[in-house]
Image (cartoon, grey):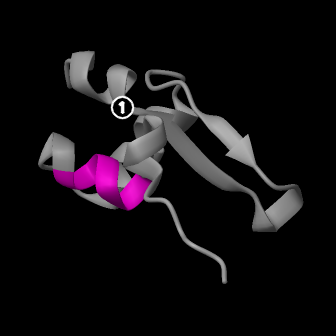
Amino acid sequence: MIREIPLSDVGLLNVADAAVELETAVRTVQKWILDGRLPVVIAGAGKRGVYLLRVADVTKFQPP
């Protein structure tokens, strides 16, 4: 049996969860990532890659 562990339990958030934490739209978080304002870990390759953000980075981030 496979037991899933929430990303937040290992200190990571997906873009949608980061948007909720920052009280903004997913597209806004994506823009901040592309602008280099929020660092990410990319899991996977190519178009199937997923951006993951560290909880610590999201917590200390000050939106422009």
Q: Classify mark 1: residues with Cα within 10 Å, few (<14), some (14-19) or many (20+).
A: many
Q: Which residue is nearer to you in this view: 1 or 55?
A: 1
User: As drawn, which residue projects farthest toward the bottom?
Assistant: 1
Above or below, 34 against 44 in this view is above
For the stretch drawn in magenta, what is the main secondary structure? helix
**Residue 31 position in % (x across, y down):** 44, 42
| Residue occupying the far right of the picture | 45
Image position of 38 with respect to 8: above or below: above
Q: Residue at x 48, y 39 (%)?
A: 10
Left or right side of 48 for 16: left
The amino acid pointed to by label 1 is: Val
The residue lying at 42 percent from left, 34 percent from top is: 32
Left or right: residue 59 versus residue 52 is left
Q: Residue most toward the left?
A: 23
Q: Percent position (x, y) of residue 47?
A: 80, 65
What residue is shown at x 36% (from left), y 31% (from top)? 55
Numbered range of the magenta stretch: 15-20
Residue at the image position 43 percent from the left and 53 percent from the top: 15
Q: In this view of the protein, can residue 26 be seen by the observer?
A: yes
Asked whether 46 or 34 is in front, the reply is: 46
User: In which quadrant is the N terminus drawn?
Assistant: bottom right
Q: Is residue 64 visible?
A: no
**Circle 1 SS class:** helix
Is residue 32 in the magenta section? no
Q: Which quadrant of the figure contains the C terminus?
A: top left
32 left or right of 24 in image: right
> Which one is nearer the viewer's eye here, 6 or 48?
6
Dot 1 corresponds to which residue?
55
On whether residue 16 falls in the magenta region, the answer is yes
